[in-house]
Image (cartoon, rainbow, N blue to C red):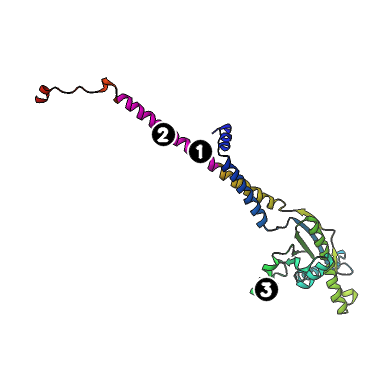
Amino acid sequence: MEFAEILRTLRRYWVATALTVVVAIGAAVVVRMSSHSVPTGAATVQILVDSPSSELANLTQNPTPLISRAAVFAQVMSSQAVIQEIASAANVPVGQITAQGPYTGAAENLNVITPSEARSSQLVAEKAIYRITLQAQQNEPVITTTVQAPTPAAAARIANAVYAGVQHYVTTIQQSGHTPEADRVTLRQLGSAQTATVNGGSKGTMTIAAFLGVMLVGLLGILGLEAIRKRDDELESIEDELAAEFDSVSHKPESRLPLASAGERRR
């Protein structure tokens, strides 16, 4: 079917075509409204677990204890107490932030099966706007923090607030415990948060796909019905031509057989 013929068909069935467009728009609106707000921004920041004298800069010091300490810190940073400090530093409601991890490394034995009560809380936290993932590096005292948020700027704000929140939490514990200055753990942020955009067009893509899908199905249905109608018309035309030809042949005098005479019948 040529393009011009397709346009003529759609114009002939303009009511069905308009109805298809309306249904496609409705499907796109429903998909867009029902789609969950997925994170579209990401930011990554690294925190170094060090000592006041910086054991990493001292060749005579063994950094292995700091590596183990970083794994423990990564586990503590996913607790609700630290999340509250991060939310306060970022000036966002604490209910909008959730943290998870670590899953590998020296603190892997701390990853136990979550009870059903705690799992229900995790299911609620999955709807949080800001999602923090913590990962302790295996061979260095560094904690990598990844934040997902609706925008890259929002993700960077939360990522930069992680260090401030954790630092305030640790300082409070050190002061309340009267920990000597020389024995205190020192946290250092390794540069500002690095941002990126992820899944930026997923919601728009789903909306466009829903619209085009319904339009394609509807228009193909209209064209398919028109093709069936034309085929039926052609078959009916062929039948009419055959019937007319048969009638014309049957009414010709030369086509009639002569009647047998009485003598021939007696024979």
Query: With 264 as the anchor, is 38 left or right in this view?
Result: right
Q: Quadrant of the C terminus?
A: top left
Labels 1 and 3: the sequence-earlier one: 3
Q: Nearer the viewer, residue 236 or 146?
A: 236
Callout 3 environment at 10 Å: few (<14), some (14 to 19), or many (20+)?
few
Please determine whether, in this image, residue 226 is positioned above or below residue 196.
above
Q: Identify the mark at residue 236; answer none if there is no mark.
A: 2
Q: Nearer the viewer, residue 53 or 252?
A: 252
Q: Which residue is mark 3?
A: 118
Callout 2 environment at 10 Å: few (<14), some (14 to 19), or many (20+)?
few
Q: Which residue is mark 1?
A: 226
The image quadrant of residue 151 is bottom right
Give the image location of residue 3, x and y in percent: 58, 33
* Residue range highlighted in magenta: 220-249
Give the image location of residue 175, x and y in percent: 88, 77
Callout 1 environment at 10 Å: few (<14), some (14 to 19), or many (20+)?
some
Tag 3, which secondary structure?
helix
Tell me the chief SS of the magenta region.
Answer: helix
Callout 3 amino acid: Ala
